[in-house]
Amino acid sequence: MSTNDSKSRPDVIARQLTAVPRSGIRDFFEIVSTMQDVISLGIGEPDFDAPWHIREASVFALERGATSYTSNLGLLSLRQAIARYLEETMGLAYCPKSEILISVGVSEALDLAIRAICNPGDEILYHEPCYVSYGPLIQFAHGVPVPVPTTMEHEFRLTRTALEERVTPRTKALLLNYPNNPTGAALTYDDARMLADFVQAHDLILITDEIYAELTYDQKHVSVAAFPGMHERTIFLHGFSKAWAMTGFRIGYACAPAALTDAMMKIHQYTMLCAPILSQEAAREALRQAGEDVELMKTEYRKRRNFLLRSFADIGLPCFTPRGAFYAFPSIASTGLTAHDFAFGLLEQEKVACVPGTAFGPSGEGFVRCAYATSLDAIKEAVTRIARFIGR
Amino acid sequence: MDELLKILKTNALESADNIAKMLDCSTEEVRERIAAYEKQGVIRGYQAIVNEDVLKMDRVTAVIEVRVSPEREGGFNRIAERISKFNEVQSLYLMSGDFDLLLFVVGRDLKEVAFFVSEKLATIEGVHGTATHFMLKTYKHHGVFMESPDEYERLKVTP
């Protein structure tokens, strides 16, 4: 169909798509990509390459002729390795044969999870600020996104009161992402217990995106999925992108009781068929020495986090101490600028890219996201420039 | 290993102020801990990692395997210390396996190293045999790549 035709027919694009606004981060990206010598704190991925042994295993698999489809659920050996890993590290028990589905990144797994449970008009609760895709994916599935704002005062954790205020008879599920992108918030044991209790009290499904589970700095990660009574009502999402620096491999997974896994599988088999076999082989290798790779990168991130936090304190930008992931979310309210003006001004005047908090929902106003998954030298220079920008 | 030492091993020029920020402690504490490491002899010095290949320095490095007989009471120590005192010897290690000592030796040219081996090293009492290998190119030294690999371009902003 030519452009002219689409102009003459305003209904060419499906209605639920036109209802979804363009991602705020896209506009920002378009501008940044045309500029030279930008120092970027705007990247939501590790600056490390995937560990060499993982890349090498992928090359070896290719040499052996791993160029075919796999089972829809993914290689059984990988699902078995994932089951072992989740049991050992988070105390989660999933059957590799019927309760684990390998997906193309957690992004696909999240789409599967929402589409598998959402009837038109179903409400899904999620915290905000949050990852950019949550609201749109719920809308694509004809559901109703119900964001629950979180605040710096409560360390960007959900409170029972805020949840109770928004739950209705149409509420189908609660969607969580802790450790959190963009705030760096993580759950305490008590938070997790409260959330498990809330989900059960209202007979909801829990979708929990724990892509940053390995990257916690002050405490061990707690999964709401591990609480008694949660297994049967939880879709647990995880993957290899962040902790193993494997973003481009696009490899993640969803774990859920067999009936839910079957439902997700119906969509996955017709839309994706299976995750790429080379990425599955790489993921298998990643789990072979899971602890070492992750620990090495985590130690680096911790130093960078500390450096960035102290630097923000030095220049008078209040910032909640991020407990996980690799983002700091300083408040820029004291500058009198909006998140948008701060981010665009900083980019224009000082060539430092950070993401306006509003890209992650309206409650991100007054904040910017600074990723510290970038080299210490870049962070040092960025902080000097930010100080100059705000005149401190 | 202490995180402080890891930071210095990566970049010995990192300021005490920056290290304090990374380790979330005071600058004074960092200075004191570094001083203590120096005093205990844990930190033996600070050096730049130089890619000598690009300097065209007209010198060669040889890796020499040496077989020696250990001495009663002294073991390998006395002979190793004796060899390590030559200025030509940059590094010296006691090894397991087919030979005993591994030496990194530098000289102006092949001839100079050959002279050192035949006149000085091989003539030491207790040295039974040597095997000399000349280094042709350095790819990685002390964990540092001598040539920066081509960086794969990444997106500048991602969600």
Image (spheres, coloured by chain):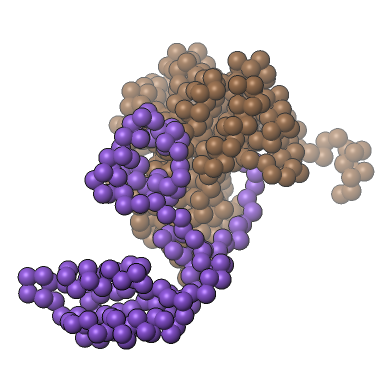
Chain colours: A brown, B purple
Direction from residue B4 to residue A268 in the image, left or right: right
Q: Residue at x 27, y 84 (%)?
A: B122
Where does the image place residue A357, in percent across and percent down from the top left?
Answer: 61, 26
Direction from residue A355 to residue A224 in the image, left or right: left
Q: Residue at x 60, y 26 (%)?
A: A387
Point out the residue furthest to the left here.
B73
Give above or below for B28 relative to B58. above
Where does the image place residue A7, in percent across and percent down from the top left?
Answer: 90, 38
The answer to which of A69 and A38 lies nearer the viewer is: A38
The answer to which of A92 and A386 lies nearer the viewer is: A386
Where does the image place residue A329, in percent across and percent down from the top left?
Answer: 54, 27
Q: Residue at x 31, y 71 (%)?
A: B86
Picture quadrant where residue A349 is located: top right
| Residue B21 in view (yes/no) | yes
| Residue A207 in view (yes/no) | no
The answer to which of A73 and A148 lies nearer the viewer is: A148
